[in-house]
Amino acid sequence: MIISQIYFERYWVSYKNSRLTSWGLGAVIIITYFIQEFCLFQLSLFNIGQVVFMQVVSVTMLFRDKVYKIWWALLALTPLFVNVVEYLMGILPLKDWWYWIVESIVFTTICLALTRWCKISKRISYFYAIASLGIVELVSLAITRSFSPVSIAAATLGLFVIAMFEDQRFYSEKKNEQKIKLLEKESERDDLTGLLNYRALSQEINRLANNNEIHNIVIGALDIDHFKKINDTYGHFVGNEVLNYFSTVFREQIHSAFPKHGYVYRFGGEEFTIVVSNHSLEEVYQLLQSIEKFFNNKSIVTKEGMKLTISFSCSLTDRLNDELLDTTLKRADKMLYSVKNNGRGWIVTDQHHQRPQKPSLERKINNNY
């Protein structure tokens, strides 16, 4: 059930933008939590005569991540829930109600202090929280004069064993998460150029579309002109050098001009895509004009010493509100083909439909090949 809580948490965060779904998942988390707490109550009460283990669940979930604020409320309610159930079962008298509230406040305060204590790791904080749970329970036993070998062992040795096992689980989970993130990162990179691939592009577009701080997304489709002729004339190794050179220049220029808002992706072959957020289409257009001038004025020098001058065709378009990624890309791709069919080596946008007549913008592949 704890594992199910972990997945409920992740789904809950993913659907924060949907109020109905968010409320529904929140209700599921709360209901599941108290069901598992009641099950633990039955096990601990009738098997070891100690209910302190119930609070381990709330502490475990609380120290997983500070983001899930719902666990603060559940942490505070857990001792009250336990004591109310014990009262309904005739185990505790109602006259001790004030102590139930004090117990909740004290333990919640301890956990709050530990999570705010930034100088210690989360693993150590968790261990301290479990230790404080045992201390609170021992104080409770002293006040109610309920000391017994079983209850003392449960509040000390039992919690210590749980803390050790949970610490190992936490450590293993973090290592697995790191491995998963590394694999995901590697799966989002193009092996040859190191650029992000289509999978990363799709995820980035969805992230940007759901970010309220993003007010504009410009998408560009690019194609190295006559790249097949380069491969056919000089071979694929030279072609790979051209791809790497082109990718490096674009990545540096885009990242420099639009830090944290501009990304370059490789679709495959000589096809690329750029995504720029929170900047106007005109700004991106101006940058691409400067990049095309750079390629006009500086040749690629291969490892064999050959000099090649390349050009690219490009289309830029604004992504419309609530528009699917594929729709935007298809529009950009259609615009790109209009460039290819009209001489290549120039940029078309939603505002610039005609091929520029400036000589510097009419780039052609060097006749060396």
Image: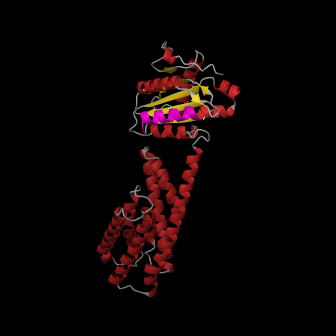
Residue 227: percent from left, percent from top: 63, 26
- Judged from this view, the residue extending furthest toward the front is 305
**Nearer-the-camera pick, 259 or 28:** 259
The answer to whether one can see residue 353 in this image is no
The magenta stretch spans residue 246: yes
Residue 97 located left or right of residue 293: left
Q: Does residue 80 sit above or below 46 in this rendering?
A: above
Q: Does residue 279 sit above or below 125 in this rendering?
A: above
* Residue occupying image coordinates x 51% and y 32%: 250
Q: Does residue 74 sit above or below 320 in this rendering?
A: below
* Residue occupying image coordinates x 51% and y 63%: 2
Residue 239 located left or right of residue 25: right
* Residue occupying image coordinates x 37% and y 61%: 72
Q: Quadrant of residue 221?
A: top right
Q: Which residues are magenta?
A: 244-259
Residue 209: percent from left, percent from top: 46, 37
Q: Does residue 134 sit above or below 254 in this rendering?
A: below
The quarter of the picture where the C terminus appears is top right
**Nearer-the-camera pick, 49 or 166:** 166
